[in-house]
Image (cartoon, helix red, strand yellow):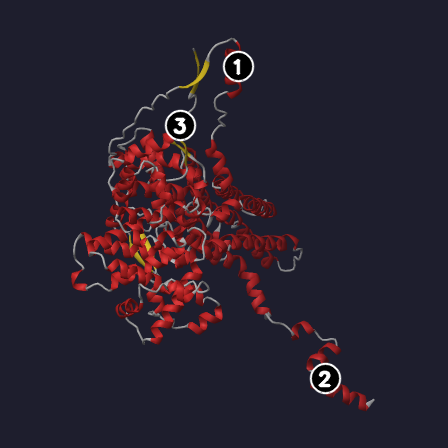
Amino acid sequence: MTQKSNFRSYKYNLFPAIGVLALGGDHRKLFEIIPDHVKQKWSEWAPEGLVLISVASQIVLFLLGDLRKHNPRTRIRIALWCAYLLAYAVASGALSVITRSALDVCSSSTTSNRNSKYEKLNTSELVSFWAPFLLLHLGGPDTVSAYSLEDNELWLRHLLEVVFQSGVALYILLLSWPGCSDLPLLSILVYIVGFIKCYERIQALRLANTEHLRDSMLGSPDPGPNYPKFLEDYRLRKNQGHDVSIGEVPEAPLPVTDHECPSRGNVISEAYALFQTFKRIFVDLILTFEDKDQSQSYFRHLTSSDAFSAVEIELGFAYDMLYTKAKVVYTFVGLVIRLTSVFILLMASMGFYFLCDVDEYRVTDVAITYLLFATAIIMEIFAVITMLRSDWTDVWLSQHNYSRADLILPFLKKKPTKLRWSNSIAQIDLLSFALEEKPASLLTTQEFLGIDKYRVKHRYKTYSKVSNNMKDLIYKQFHVFMSSSSDPKALCSHKGSFSLRENGCHDLLWSITKVEFDQSIIIWHIATTLCYCSEDLDQQDQGDIDVCRLESKHISDYMLYLLVSYPVMLPIGIGMIRYRDTCAEATRYFKENGPITEKVEACRKLLEVCCLDVLPSKVKGDRCKSALFDGCRLALTLKNMEEERMWKVMRQVWIEILAYAATHCRGFQHEQQLRKGGEFLTHVWLLMAHLGITEQFQVSQGDARAKLVVA
């Protein structure tokens, strides 16, 4: 027995874990990862912590929801994305924690410590009072009903989630009823506001759903003229011996509505009227010749700046329609509901202050309750002010002949510099990437996290303001094309060839017609960079030449940015493969002939290599998709022209490339970019549609153009 005891003692000392289990000890203590005091603290303060996180996420959503409309910065979108996901997850989690707390109080039957039980009951009652505020948080602020278009498509899933969480909140109310204070009665008031907010969000998601948008814009079906009846009449006359022929009835011309140049106060209402028609192109529906005539008669009086301003206002309406609660709250009924919500919240807060004995609760819980009231009321008040200062309110006032409302309500006046989009375009220069001008400082960490390839695009991305010169050049070229072509839609099929032919540059057509669209972007980008950087810096300020030179470079870098970052906005191709191969070849060349670190020196070296007698494709074959020396070849040809003619051709070609890309991008992709500060490509796309330069005008004439002619 002694040997066995010694062996057992040795075994337990050598393997303490096995010893604890063998002796029947509490093995849960041995393998405990989270200490008991941490669990206790979490059980005690979990509702408070989750509610504070929910409040913080609501504030972030309220502040950044409208900011992303005109700020393209990635960190804004990341912060908003985190807050959007966190807001609804934390609100749901907090409701479950509060439910557990309420159930624990209800199931507690111990009466040994009445004071402790009474304190716990009061704490639980106040925590249960937070449930309707979490329901209000599920409704979200007016500035962001959907983070992306996918949220609108999944509106039924959001509806199911809100219905379930509303049921949980009601269950919490029933558990705390009747209570020992007036808190359950005050909860009903906050519940009403929470239900209103949830209804507004779900309704906004449903109305912005693509299927619903398309159905709401289709109108009633049009069967057209009665063809069988016409044939029956034709045969009847024929059988009666009449010499019958089919003639054509000249259609009565529509009354030409020649819009006057709109005053500053009517621009928003005119843009809204245009938006009601042209929002159909966002869901790939067609337009009629009446729509084109109305739009062209309006835009013919506008300058380039005013035309782009009208487009900005329209896209602002589109953003509100797709990503906010505008369609629900920016109505008379919505205003009444919003004012009612503010009034109810004020009543509930006053009732809590005067009817409830706050000394019965913990100071921290009382402070959180006041924070919930203050946040909800302030956000509702700011929502009302935002509503009154919005473009939607201007439209309503204009429709009801309240054009002088700003004299009665001065706070309705908006700043003349109101931002409706970022007014900037992203820029990426291929040679800057190949020269590695901005090496990563934490490359090992980025590679470990798997974000190195993602970060490199942002490291070389810069932003440039869309100048009035660029808008003017684009607008004028569209008008020149419309005046020189009988079919404005033909511009949708040109990728720069029209400008080359008009300027007699037939030797450059290979860079447009003989290559894919993504390849032509890279070729012309390289040529533009080489011509831009190789010029004498002392001769840059030359008026129109410098404007064309600068804006050509901006459009060139912008198109390459779209090719690299948003290839879905361009026609299908292998642009990313061509870009990577071109960068690899340029990097290899700079290392073999260098080290070359300056862009001016790199451009000079590249122009020295290219020979026009031997084509790069003859040497390199088809496996490598690099377009580096094709761009050099184009640059050498362009530099043989006069400087003024060279930049004129380059500017016109880039505008054509921009227009081609705009018209071949689906409306869904244009919608997606509205939440990222807006893309200039979308503005060009909508402007072209207003000018009739789009393939979506597929109704060219009206009905009843045939008649029977009886001899």
Percent across and percent down for residue 509 are 33, 52
The quadrant of the rendering that contains the N terminus is: bottom right
Report the side of 403 relative to 573 (left or right): left
* 265 versus 367 height, above or below: above
Name which residue lies at 31% across and 53% down: 424
Residue carrying label 2: 12
In the image, 601 versus 184, the foreground residue is: 601
Q: Residues within 10 Å of mark 1 (few under 14, many from 20)?
A: few
C-alpha span from label 1 to label 3: 27 Å
Report the side of 425 relative to 139 (left or right): left
* 394 versus 42 height, above or below: above
Q: Which mark is residue 701?
A: 3
Kind of residue at badge 3: Gln
Indicate which disc, 2 or 1, sits on the residue closer to the N terminus: 2
Residue farthest to the top?
240
Quadrant assignment, res 640: bottom left
Q: Residues within 10 Å of mark 2 (few under 14, many from 20)?
A: some
Kind of residue at badge 2: Tyr
Name which residue lies at 31% across and 69% down: 609
* 237 versus 658 height, above or below: above
In the image, 146 versus 357, the foreground residue is: 146
Residue carrying label 1: 235
Q: Which mark is residue 169?
A: none
C-alpha span from label 2 to label 1: 110 Å
Percent across and percent down for residue 129 are 52, 49
Percent across and percent down for residue 552 are 27, 54
